[in-house]
Image: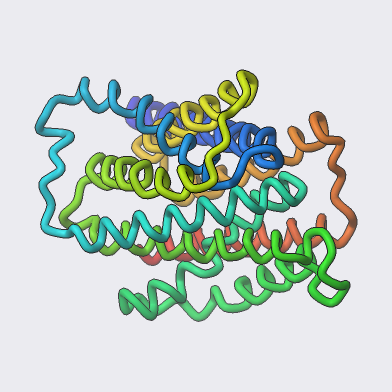
Amino acid sequence: MRAVTGAVTNLRRGALLAVSGAAAFAMVSACVKLVGSDLPNPVVVFFRNLFALAVLLPWLAKRGPAAVSMRTARPGMHLLRAATGLGAMYCFFYAISQMQLASAVLLNYSRPLFLPFIAWIWLGERPAARIFPAVIIGFLGVLLILKPGLGWQGQAGWAGLAGLAAGILAATSMAAIRRMSDTEPTVRIVMYFSVLGTLVSALPAIAVWQTPTPAQWWALFGAGSIATAGQLLLTRAYSLAPAAHIGALIYTTVLFAALIGWIVWQETPDLLSAIGAAAVICAALIVVVTRRQRT
């Protein structure tokens, strides 16, 4: 009885932490949108990485030298993970600056629709046949959001394609993490991405440099620091509750983003986008749960 009670308590705590992490990532997206239309995208990406690293370092220091060792036998995989993750960030931040917040976030979170096929091609992990109908529904939902047949205006333009590219690149980054997780601890993977992301993104930021205003500094710091907090909250949530449950709750990020977009920018999705969003979320949840059941 005590074990059952403890499991229920951990599930509730994990769920609360997962929803808190989802809210944090919605806030990060809002911070990016606040500055994205005024600052060059490379500058925003650089400071997102820099401030995230600045917040992460004290937390890593408390774990001791052994926990933050950078010695690795998989430098190529770390570079690939950094390249795809950073590419996803550039695309996502551009989409956020040009689209409704919830739609951009949703396209970025379409990654579970692509991950099974990337893992199949790259890792040899054949997806279960029952996920294919869900993936088709998910892609139809994406088309409803992008509306490619209605002209290259608004969300059907380059911003929509950038949001979709962010989802594909993020899925590739997740596959890279899975590929090296047999030898690389989570802390080392996070550390390599933070360091490489900051160093690499500094170069294009210098090329288009624009000094942020005081208000923009606060938004940029919020994007980096809150992102680190959100990642730590999700890491803790995964340690307390089943991954399938946590993966489902992460999609509350889209709901938080929709709420923030409505309050701050008076954004209201049209009917087709709302139907598409529901289709993508349902399809992605089915894929996530199916993959977790197989693993």
Image quadrant holding the N terminus, namely top left
Render colour scheme: rainbow
| Left or right side of 289 for 266 | right
> Is 229 left or right of 194, judged from the image as shown?
right
Q: Is residue 260 visible?
A: yes
1 is higher (above) or lower (below) than 93? above
Location of residue 163 by image quarter: bottom right
Q: Position of residue 111 (x, y in %)?
A: 53, 61
Picture coordinates of residue 200, whole percent (x, y): 36, 49
On the image, the x and y values in percent for residue 206 come to 46, 43
Q: Is residue 186 above or below residue 151?
A: above
Q: Residue at x 58, y 46 (%)?
A: 41
Q: Is residue 46 left or right of residue 134?
A: left
Q: Nearer the viewer, residue 135 or 70?
A: 70
User: Residue 251 appears at what percent x and percent y?
Assistant: 60, 47
Q: Quadrant of residue 59?
A: top left
* Front in this rendered view, residue 176 or 82: 82
Q: Is residue 12 visible?
A: no
Residue drawn at (46%, 67%) of the image: 115
Name the residue at 38% across, 25% down. Answer: 55
Count of number-bearing discs: 0
The part of the image, by quadrant, that contains residue 174 is bottom left
Task: Say which quadrant the C terminus sits in.
Answer: bottom left
Direction from residue 55 to residue 218 in the image, left or right? right
